Image: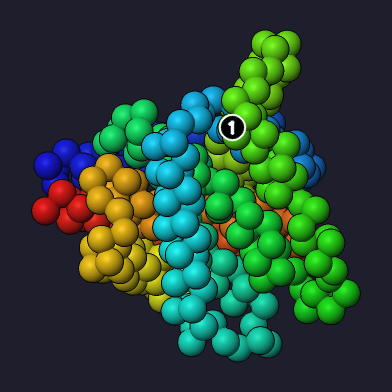
Amino acid sequence: MFFQNFLTAAQQVVILYLIAAVGFAADRLKIYTEKTARACNDLLFYIITPCVIIKAFMTTEFTAESAKGFFMAALCCAMTFAVAILISVPFFRDKTNEDNAVYKYASIYGNMGYMALPLANAVLGAEGVFYCSAGIITFQLFCFTHGVWLMRKKEENEKLQIRRMLLNPGVIGVTLGLPFFLLQLKAPEILTSPISFIGSMNTPLAMLMFGTYMSNADIRHIFSNKQQYPAALLKDVAVPVIMFGILRLTGLVSGALLTSCIIQSSAPSANNTVMFAAKYGRDTAVASKTVTFVSFVSILTMPAMIALCGT
């Protein structure tokens, strides 16, 4: 079982990095450059991301049992982010180093849509996809509020208003999609098809953009940056182990829901670490190398955590 889970997680990483490799090559060939990718950032940020959330709500059937499982999955995901935020406090405290915002973000927020969701589907099937959808929604709420606050420059945070934090693509997507789940509204195909098509651009476009950023980063020194190691330790080891202990000791969840929650908590750094870095003027090269490094480490840690759930 451990070896099977290892191969499943490794395969997902390879698939993602093959798409990124296309973006890498496209930048080197001047077909699709980093400058063009930055221009696509707002498209991904403001249009494609909300479509992913709305689609998740539209395609989920509402029952008492599914609603309870969905709520528990969302709660566990929120607990994961709370734990990650708390244990990351002692790290990256030097405010004079602007890259610390990137490292902290990478140690808190995981690759929910591009890594956790496909892996949950491979290991647990449709049930895992359903639970991970709740995690993706929770992820959007956190990263578009706390994550935005974390990645914004200090001078921007000083004038940041609560209204601006709440009126973001993640929260708007949840607001628009929630009625479809709670009321089981059936939108016509003329509406659902465009939302589905646009949302399906999320993973390939994000990875192509990631590849262009990698093309402009000095990947020869990807393992030499010491600040990436605590980020990987927090994201790939500390957070999932702590969450596993909490969930097993409290008996809050079990079975497929437990495995799904651990898959989400052990997912490597989110690809939108790079997207947010580009959006808020942080170093995209640092973000790209950090996400890559943490993802490589997760090839070993994710299967181990999944196997642990089965014991």
The structure residue drawn at horizontal position 60% and vertical position 34%, both measured from the top left corner, is 182
Q: Quadrant of the N terminus?
A: top left
Q: 43 and 189: which one is in front? A: 189
Spot occupied by residue 103 in the image (x, y as percentages of width and height)? 54, 71
> In the displayed structure, would residue 297 be above or below residue 230?
above
Q: 296 and 307: which one is in front? A: 307
Residue most toward the top? Answer: 189
The structure residue drawn at horizontal position 25% and vertical position 61%, both measured from the top left corner, is 251
Question: How dense is the environment of label 1, judged by Cα within 10 Å: few (below 14), some, or many (20 and up)?
Answer: some
Q: 184 and 76: which one is in front? A: 184
Q: Assign a secondary structure to mark 1.
A: helix
185 left or right of 160? left
Spot occupied by residue 230 in the image (x, y as percentages of width and height)? 41, 76
Res. 151 in view: no
Res. 184 in view: yes
Residue most toward the front? Answer: 64
- Render colour scheme: rainbow
Q: In the rendered picture of this protein, how many numbered marks are placed on residues?
A: 1
The structure residue drawn at horizontal position 60% and vertical position 88%, both measured from the top left corner, is 94
118 left or right of 182? left
> In the displayed structure, would residue 160 be above or below residue 288?
below
Spot occupied by residue 227 in the image (x, y as percentages of width and height)? 47, 77
> In the displayed structure, would residue 239 be above or below residue 182?
below
Q: Quadrant of residue 242 in the image?
A: bottom left
Residue most toward the right? Answer: 159
Spot occupied by residue 97 in the image (x, y as percentages of width and height)? 64, 83
Q: Quadrant of residue 18 in the image?
A: top left
The structure residue drawn at horizontal position 78% and vertical position 78%, both measured from the top left corner, is 154
* Residue type, numbered disc 1: Phe
Q: 293 and 307: which one is in front? A: 307
> In the displayed structure, would residue 87 be above or below residue 190?
below
> Residue beneath label 1, please?
181
